[in-house]
Amino acid sequence: MVLATLSFALMGALTKLLGNRYPSVELVFFRNFIGLIIILLSIYHKPVIQIGGKTKLLLFRGSIGATSLFAFYYCLTKMQLAVANTYNLTYPLFIGFFSVVLLKANLSWKQWLSIIIGFAGVLFIFRPDMNYPVKYHLVGLYSGVGTSLGYLSIHYLGKYYDRRTILLSFLAGGLILSCFSFLVSAFYQNPSYDFFLASFIMPQGYDWLLILCMSVIALIGQSFVTNAFSLGKPAVMGTLNFLQIPFSWIAGMILGDANYNLYTYIGIFLVLLSGIWMSQLSNNR
């Protein structure tokens, strides 16, 4: 799990570095395109064995996962790395919230307190005297919301589909949406929607190598996560997952991210605290 968080921190650093020259939509395109080829080769080598029958939920997983990845990559290119990762890692809080609203689950008072602490942390980051436009914060929050809904759908899809099929829906969804974005952008341009609409820019020189490294490292990180959760206790793995924030903070400082102010530090700490506590409480129930 530590290797996974290091991989994702490095992926975020490469994404931010490439984001100075290429739109986030294009980076999602290359990540998903390379990943899709690898998954298809895997399925060709070893065909999937599954029950199936949940096509609508599978399509939902693909679309919600793709749009949340769009949001996450956009934040990586526009915000400090630790802030972008903190927003994305609010997903345990939203999983708890949606479990009550959609699945009618019962949460203990400690879990509710954990959620409240987490959202208080978000408010400290998303404060009145913001360093970033409101759009950046809203897109960041959506990355956490979309990730939580994606993970909830995976929980049920895993009973009917091969893990590679679920991942394939996610990769294909991002690839299709990226191509749609390029197509629309050829006829319509609006900077307000740059988190979704962007023109394709042909990579130059060593950028091809950086794009390949970003895509492969993302897949390696995902592989480490899958193996970690299959071998270790979910609460411990969920807790270690939050190492992405300090690792991303270090990577961001190396790339020249400005120092965070006190409000941001407090917000990141509260989200870390609530996420770790929620992971522990969920494992104990």
Image (cartoon, rainbow, N blue to C red):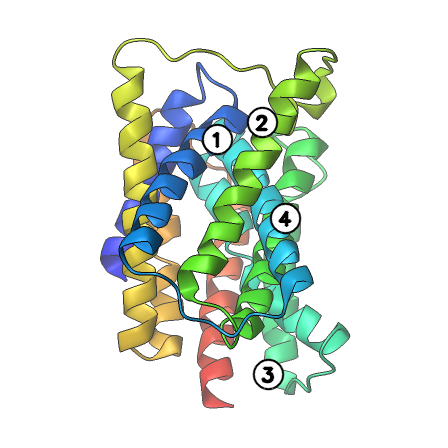
Circle 1 sits on which residue? Answer: 29
Q: Name the mark nearer the viewer: 2 or 1.
A: 2
Q: Nearer the viewer, residue 35 or 4?
A: 35
Separation (CA) of disc 2 from disc 3: 44 Å
The amino acid type, in three-letter code, at marker 1 is: Phe
> Callout 1 environment at 10 Å: few (<14), some (14 to 19), or many (20+)?
many
Circle 3 sits on which residue? Answer: 110
Going from the N terminus, do you reach mark 4 or mark 1 first? 1
Badge 4 element? helix
* Marks 3,1: beta carbons within 8 A: no
Q: Name the mark nearer the viewer: 2 or 3.
A: 2
- In the image, residue 204 above or below residue 272: above
Total numbered circles: 4
Q: Quadrant of the N terminus?
A: bottom left
Q: Is residue 283 left or right of residue 218?
A: right
Q: Nearer the viewer, residue 277 or 75?
A: 75
The amino acid type, in three-letter code, at marker 3 is: Lys
The amino acid type, in three-letter code, at marker 4 is: Ser
The amino acid type, in three-letter code, at marker 2 is: Cys
* Marks 2,1: beta carbons within 8 A: yes
Circle 4 sits on which residue? Answer: 63
For residue 267, the mark is none
Going from the N terminus, do you reach mark 3 or mark 4 first? 4
Report the residue at 49% width, 69% height from top.
Answer: 161
Task: Tell which residue pokes out farthest to the bottom in this image.
Answer: 285
Separation (CA) of disc 3 from disc 1: 40 Å
Going from the N terminus, do you reach mark 2 or mark 3 first? 3
